[in-house]
Image (cartoon, rainbow, N blue to C red):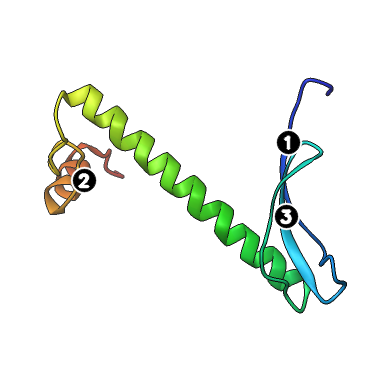
Amino acid sequence: MADELFITIDTAPASDNWGFVGRALVGEHEAYRTIRAYSTAGEALTAVQGLVAGVLGTLLAGQEWRSAQDEFGHVPRRTELDFGLGAKVRRRETEPTDG
């Protein structure tokens, strides 16, 4: 579809033709190219995947934390986020039993 835009992670030959770099593209625009060159395209792809996953994970965690603060009106407590052993017990009690 013409109205879709994809973020792509791929590899390309390094500019000096010694190995491969990982790339992150937004549509046809190269947004990032790894600084290091890797011996194989697979290594370059793994490296750039790790970078993108780390950045997205950090952004998503921060946004979720801000949303929880907005919802509770304060820094959320572990119990409000269903962390810890108590949360597992509560879930087990509310899950339907096989019978």
Whole-number angstrom distance, CA of label 1 to CA of label 2 = 40 Å
Whole-number angstrom distance, CA of label 3 to CA of label 2 = 44 Å
Please tell me whether residue 42 is drawn above or below residue 65 in the rendered image.
below
Whole-number angstrom distance, CA of label 1 to CA of label 3 = 13 Å
Q: Residue drawn 84% across and 22% down? A: 2
Identify the mark nearer the N-term, 1 or 2: 1
67 lies left or right of 41: left
The kind of secondary structure element at disc 1 is: loop
Between marks 3 and 2 in the image, the one whose residue lies nearer the viewer: 3
Q: Residue drawn 15% across and 42% down? A: 90
Q: Are marks 3 and 2 in contact (CB under 8 Å)?
A: no
Q: Which residue matches tag 1? A: 6
The amino acid on which the numbered mark 2 sits, given as a three-letter code, is Arg
Q: Do the residues labelled 1 and 3 touch (CB within 8 Å)?
A: no
Q: How crowded is mark 1: few (under 14 residues within 10 Å), some or many (20 or more)?
A: few
Q: Which residue matches tag 2? A: 92
Q: Give the image location of residue 42, x and y in percent.
A: 74, 70
Toward which corner of the image does residue 59 lie, by quadrant?
A: top left
Give the mark count.
3
The amino acid on which the numbered mark 1 sits, given as a three-letter code, is Phe
Q: Residue drawn 66% across and 64% down? A: 35
Please tell me whether residue 91 is drawn above or below residue 38 in the rendered image.
above
Q: Give the image location of residue 62, x and y in percent.
A: 35, 40
Q: Which residue matches tag 3? A: 23
The kind of secondary structure element at disc 3 is: strand
Identify the mark nearer the N-term, 3 or 2: 3
Q: Using the image as rendered, state which of residue 26 and residue 36 is in the foreground.
A: 36
79 lies left or right of 70: left
